[in-house]
Amino acid sequence: MRYTQLILSLFLLFTFVIALPTPAPIDAVAAQAAADKNKKNANKGNNGNKGKTTAKANTNGKKPAADGDKCAAAKKLANGIEKNIAAQRQEQSDVAKIKSIVSKDKVDKNEFDQAKQKFLGTINNGIKIRQENQQITFQGNAATAGLKKVADAQGKELKQAKDLKGNKDDLTTIAQLEKEFAGGIEQNQKNKQD
């Protein structure tokens, strides 16, 4: 008796699972919506094409053009943000070099000036990359606000870097820059996920 009850219960469960609706692929929904829209428009206008659907179903597995453009922009933006993260890692390396120079008892002014110029160039390169990334973003992209935060931080970092004098007093500014670069990398990683 128990085996019969178990088999019937499993059969009933299996029947319910099969009867559950499954979500339609987005491409099929988009193609159907386009076909319905064209059919509706054809019925409105009496242009001899009444009742015929002129749009072809999207059977190639690609998203509609608007989504495709956003997808391409998102990929390009992710690559750009990755470049910005690489620039920030270079900024960390450059500021570490400056830190080692100004930590010495006798600072070589020429060595400091060269390291500072390289550091400023790296920061400016990061700013340029971020500006390019901001041009890629599209309306409604969650990374837009994050890129604004990065822009504000980069402006502050550039000012701090320009104010470096080449002595031990720079160590507090350098410590602040190190924190900001780490925070910038973290923010850009969030931007990339958005």
Image: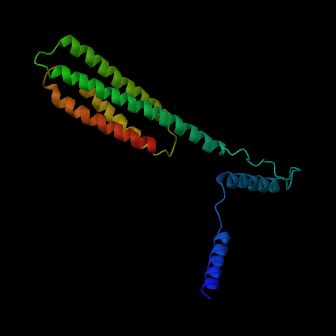
Q: Nearer the viewer, residue 176 or 96?
A: 96
Whether residue 165 is visible to the viewer of this picture, yes or no, is no
Q: In this view, does 167 lie above or below 51?
A: above
On screen, residue 43 versus residue 106, left or right, reads right
At horizontal 66% and vertical 45% (from top left) the residue drawn is: 64
Q: Position of residue 32 (x, y in %)?
A: 73, 55
Colour mode of the rendering:
rainbow
Q: In which quarter of the image is residue 170?
A: top left
Q: Position of residue 73 (x, y in %)?
A: 55, 37
On screen, residue 72 versus residue 132, left or right, reads right
Whether residue 170 is visible to the viewer of this picture, yes or no, is yes
Q: Quadrant of residue 173?
A: top left
Q: In this view, does 122 lie above or below 140?
A: above
Task: Say which quadrant the N terminus sits in.
Answer: bottom right
At horizontal 72% and vertical 51% (from top left) the residue drawn is: 31
Name, please, the residue furthest toward the bottom: 1
Name, please, the residue furthest toward the left: 105
Q: Nearer the viewer, residue 183 or 17?
A: 17
Q: Where is residue 154 in the image (x, y as percent from the top left)?
A: 33, 32
Total numbered circles: 0
Name, please, the residue furthest toward the right: 48
Q: Where is residue 9 in the image (x, y as percent from the top left)?
A: 62, 80
Q: In this view, does 118 lie above or below 65?
A: above
